[in-house]
Image (cartoon, grey):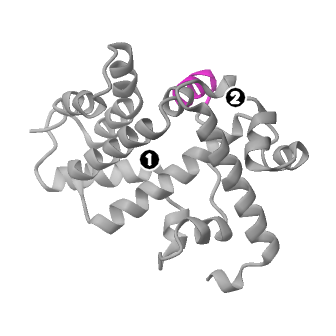
Amino acid sequence: MADTISLREKKKAKTKLALLEAALALIDEGTFRSVLVDDICERAEVSKVTFFKFFPQKEELLVYFMSVWQARCFCELSANGKRGFAAVRHIFSMVAEESRKYPGIMLSLISFLAEQKMHPCVPTLSEAELALLFPEAEDRASIGNADLYQIFVRCVREAREDGELTNDVSEQEAVMLVFSMFYGAYLTAHLFRSDDFMACYELHLKSLTR
């Protein structure tokens, strides 16, 4: 696949990913709001003109982060074969691991989403971006089309099939609750000054398991 990608598209993909990595490194334990575009550009060695060409608003970098993250999530689940609530736990463990690397990213994302009137449309990754992120993957098209909602729908359906999901909730209700856990359990752990995010996720998951 990579051989069919133009040099221009490869350069665009490398630049976008470099800007994302620079922003993540600068967030550290702070907030995305406090990170300056000038500092992102300096770290990534990219001009401000180029930055705004890719991201007309700084906050669009957070949406891009979501796009890359859920693609990585889909790829990992496909590779390890986890299903049902085991897959949900793996997703939550990825959030916990990401937070150890970039402590401020999840809170920045939650804050951003709380300010939106609707959930932002997460852009589909380009062929060049997928090639850079997943060079060994065979079915990059499926990875690029990954959607966290659909991933949770599949996990909940598998949990029902495997007899893991309590009969007290419907599958649709369970998907909504898993989304609430994804963001809410993390925020709860933060408010209680706990860095054991998985313990908080496990506590919330008890409400769905048999």
Q: Is residue 6 left or right of residue 158?
A: right
Q: Is residue 93 left or right of residue 30?
A: left
Q: Quadrant of residue 92?
A: top left
User: Which is more toward the observer, 177 or 42?
Assistant: 42
Query: Could you tell me which residue is drawn at 28 percent across and 38 percent down?
Result: 174
Crowdedness near tag 1: few (<14), some (14–19) or many (≥20) residues, C-alpha within 10 Å: some
Q: Is residue 55 above or below residue 142?
A: above
For mark 2, give the secondary structure. Answer: loop
Mark 2 or mark 1: which is in front? Answer: 2
Query: Could you tell me which residue is drawn at 56 percent across and 27 percent down?
Result: 108
Does residue 56 appear in this view? Answer: yes
User: Which is more toward the observer, 112 or 120?
Assistant: 112
Q: Give, as a three-letter code, the residue at label 2.
A: Val
User: Which is more toward the observer, 190 or 202?
Assistant: 190
**Prevailing SS of the magenta stretch:** helix
- Residues in magenta? 109-118
- Residue 201, image x, y percentages: 27, 32
Residue that sits furthest to the bottom in the current view: 3
Query: Could you tell me which residue is drawn at 78 percent across and 78 percent down?
Result: 6
Q: Does residue 116 belong to the magenta stretch?
A: yes
| Residue tagged 1 | 149
| Residue tagged 2 | 35
